[in-house]
Each structure stands twice: as C-alpha cells, then as structure tokens.
Amino acid sequence: MANIRVVATEPFEGQKPGTSGLRKRVTVFQQPRYLENFVQSVFDSLEGFAGATLVVGGDGRFHNREAVQTILKMAAANGFGRILVGRGGLLSTPAASCVIRGRRAYGGIILSASHNPGGPEGDFGIKYNIGNGGPAPERVTDAVFARTQSIREYRTLDAPDLDLERLGTQRFGGAEVEVIDPVADYRDLMARLFDFAAIRAAFAGGLRLRYDAMHAVTGPYAKAIVEDELGAPAGTVVNGTPLPDFGGHHPDPNLVHAKALFDEMMGPDAPDLGAASDGDGDRNLIIGRGVFVTPSDSLAILAANMHLAPGYRGGPKGIARSMPTSRAADQVAERLGVPCYETPTGWKFFGTLLDAGLATICGEESAGTGSDHVREKDGLWAVLLWLNILAARRQPVLGIVREHWRAHGRNHYARHDYEEVDAEAANGLMSALRGQLGALPGRRFGVHEVTTADDFAYTDPVDGSVSERQGVRIGFADGSRVVYRLSGTGTAGATLRVYIERFEPDPDRQGEDTQTALAGLAAVADELAGIRARTGRAEPDVVT
Ligand code: VG1
Ligand code: CO
C-alpha cells in the first residue's frame, strides 16, 4: 500500500481566489509546493469529507496533467474515499458541475484559467466547487485564503502517477480512483433538457451550424453531441481538438479572438448559427447569419423562449443577471411576471438563487449563460437551447432578435476593456470615482444628466451574506448606464472594465449600429472617470 507522506511547507503570498478561483501564470504554479499549498488549504477548510467523493478535472491546458496527478495523490492522502477524474484529466467546467451533482460528490476541483491564454508562458488556475456543483461561496474562499497564509504542511501519497487514459476504477492508497468518460454524464443531461428529435430533424432539413471550439475543452463535447448525436455534418465543429496552448490563441469567444467565425457569419454563404466557447467550456458566443447577438440579449431571448425546450416547459421561475449585464433580461422578467435578480459579477453568486428555486436562468454580459441544470455557466447548453429554439420557431436568428427588440425595446450594449493597466493608476481611478459618488447626481455631461451614482453592494436574499464594492454604477436621466469595475481574473497589472448601456424603445431606431449608438455615452464614461488622463490609454484594448 502506498504511504502517506506529510511534507513541511511555508506560505506563498497572494494565493487569494478572485472572481473564479486562483489564477496565475503557469510559471507561478510550477514552483514546488505552490499548487500543493493551495490544495491542502482547500482541504483544511472543509469538514466531514472522510470517505466521500471528490471530482477532479480541467480544461486540458498546459500543466493540467501534472496538476491532476498532484491533486489525486493529495486527495487520497487527505482521506477522500473515491475520486472521479475525467479521462486524460479533462472535464469542462459545466461537465464537472454536472458530475458533482449527478454522482452526489462532496465537491470538486476544477483546473482552468478559462478564457486566459495557455501554454508554458500562459495562465493556469484552480478552483473548488461545493456539493451543489457550483463555485465555493466567498465564505469558503475567504477561509481557504486565510489558510494559505498559515499553512505549515501538506499530505500526499508516495505513489506512481495514475494512468488517466484507462477508464475504470483503480485502487490508490486508501482511496479508489475512477477514470470516467468526461462527456457521458453531460450528454445524458442535455438529452433530457432539449428536444433532440426536433434539432436532429432541423439539421436533416438543412439547418447549418458552425461551432468553433477554439482548441479548448468543448471540442469532444460538441462533436459527441452536435455531430454524433444530433447528426450535424462532420466538420460542423471546427478547432475541435483540445490543445495545451489552444493552438497559440486566446480561447476567448469574443469578436476579437473569434474573428474568423464572425467574418464567416457576416459573409455571403454564412451558416444559420455560429457559436464558440471558451477554454473551460462555460462561455458561449452566439452569432446569427448577419447578426451578432450580445450575451445580454442572448440571455433575454433565451429566457423569453426557453419554454420551447422540454426541460423548461413552464418558462423561467425567475431570471438572474450580474449587475453589469444589460437590463434586457429585466424587461423579459417583467413581461413574464417573474422576479429578476441583480448579483455581483461571477457565477458563485447565482448558486443560492438556483438552489432555492428562485431563478431558472442566469447570465452575465461576459458570454456566460446557464440554468438550474448545473451550478456553472454552460456554453454548449446555451448553443443547444438556441438550436432548440431555432428548430421550434423555424425563423432565422436575425428575425428572432428583431422581433424581440420590437416587443421589449433594444438595449444597446458594449464593454470596453483596458488591459494590463498600471495597477496603481487603475486603483486610483476607482477610488477617485468612489470619492465623487455623492456629488455626481444632478451633474450634466453634454445631454447626459446623472441621476444616480453608487458602489454596488449585494445582500444575498437567501443566506443574507453581504458583498460590497462590486462596481461603480452611474445612471443617467434617459435610463442609460455606465458601470466601472476592475477585473478579478487577470494575472498581470489591472484590467479596467467599463460597461456602457443605452435603452432604445423606438423600433425605427433599433437598427442603429451599436458603436454609433453608444459613442456619446462612451465619451462621457471617459470624461467622468478620467480614463485617458489616469491610465494614458486613448482607446480600449478590447470592445465586446
Ligand atoms: C470575468 C467576467 C465574469 C466571469 C468571470 C469568470 O471576470 O467578467 O463575468 O464570471 O470572468 O468567467 P472579471 O472579474 O475578470 O471581470 V470564466 O469563463 O473566466 O471562469
Ligand atoms: Co470560462
């Protein structure tokens, strides 16, 4: 039997989980004891898991396999009874959530830096998910961080690496490790939610999809479900092989990094639906023939149409969106007569609402959409729901989007990202904004008059926990809005995100180009916060 070894260690600085787990450069994670310290701190912060089940998997990026081996040994040495790991160490984030829930595991460890670039010079990440399948709430991540600052030793198993390619159960110290098919549980869940027969018939009738998996983890899932199960022609899924460096690209499904898909969808022979997902498979990009659907609009349209899918016949019981996400979903909630919740950025805040049955569908402006089927956002799920809706409505995406705007109004929306800004300058900008909140209402910037200004604080309606300083919101007299916050997922400097939104109820003016529609407000956003003056940046790096 393999021996348990207790190894002396010392704390590392800065092992503080951000919006979604701990994310650092690969080179940081490669330091001896760095990963071990964090994993042991997670285990030290949990109780009552002796003999219980842990799920482990990641998005396949560089360092994934090594990290999985380390975690398996530590989980066995710390007393877990059973560890489920995806073949090859792979599990998309939503599939991990699905496995944790479906197999009633105690929790799970997901290895991912999501949309951040991979490879030896890229980023790596780790997060812990609780038994409901969702990201650990702040109470847990705070405890983990505290532990990382006092840790003195970790436990591991003296054992050779496990064969991660062989499906089935192997004995490992005092535990059993089962290597599972990473796709199977997830595919079964999707088949229960959606009308696969109708989608199959639509593909057979000529519906065309282009799915760009960006050489990230969703490739095997999309091929198994969209091509093998639903009969879309081979080649529908492109870049479908997960690569440790994502082929040298950012696995970020936005108009910058998925430009080839965008160009194809705007071209003369465009498919009906274009989609892409990110490194760990929890984000989705939706582009119809000739029309980009903003993630905020996609959330609203999915909420308004989800009753067309068998798993959601009654429509949503409630809708939740992160604060910076546009208010398009609020208009749907109002029409349906269901509540709409506004949460801080990050999926961890949706968990309590979903568990309590208060919300059925949730979304973020950052291309994240999901429902109560798991406790993570789910990229492929969103694509399948769109396919289900297209199969049921037999209309092009553009027609569906325009009808939606006519019925609910259009929320012009854009996010401007200023990346790797000097951290001091970014913090200075935010504190200066916070300092003038009281003085802003009543001030005019050209035609725009400020009516509200605050720093978003959230009280969870289920467990009463409070999260403060979640982003500065400025509201204007015509209902427009600008939001400022700093990213919690970056690994170098600071990233300033500026979210700009303007409501357009008039159908005759809804066709206007978004950048044109938002140009005035964008200038106000700059002036109000002094972006150019404080960061030296004249233009955002990325507009999504
Ligand atoms: C970003 C997004 C946020 C998302 C988070 C994790 O966070 O804005 O909406 O939940 O990434 O998504 P931030 O703090 O950088 O703005 V993923 O797909 O990176 O796990
Ligand atoms: Co992601």
Image (cartoon, rainbow, N blue to C red):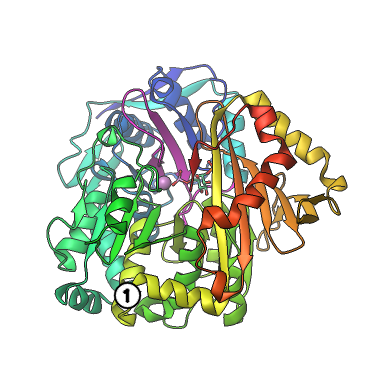
Where, by quadrant of the figure, is residue 505 drawn?
Answer: bottom right
Q: Is residue 73 magenta?
A: no
Q: Position of residue 155 (x, y in %)?
A: 42, 26
Residue 375 seen: no
Query: Which is more toward the observer, 459 or 425?
Result: 425
Dot 1 falls on a residue whose secondary structure is helix
- Name the residue that disc number 1 marks: 390
Q: Position of residue 149 (x, y in %)?
A: 60, 24
Residue 532 placement: quadrant: top right
User: Which residue corresponds to the image point at 41% horizontal and 24% vertical from the top-left?
Assistant: 29
Question: What's the residue type where badge 1 is placed?
Answer: Leu
Question: Left of 521 or right of it: where is 115?
Answer: left
Viewer can see residue 523: yes
Return the residue nearer the eye: 476 or 34.
476
x then y, percent, for residue 198:
24, 79
Relative to 231, does residue 307 appear above or below in the rendering? below
Graded by Cα atoms within 10 Å as few (under 14), some (14 to 19) or many (20 or more), the crowding at tag 1 reads many
Q: Quadrant of the N terminus?
A: top left
Residue stretch in magenta: 109-137
Q: What type of secondary structure mainly makes up the magenta span?
A: loop
Residue at 24% over, 58% down? 210
Judged left or right of residue 15, residue 437 is: right
Above/below status of 534 relative to 311:
above
**On screen, residue 346 above or below 462:** above
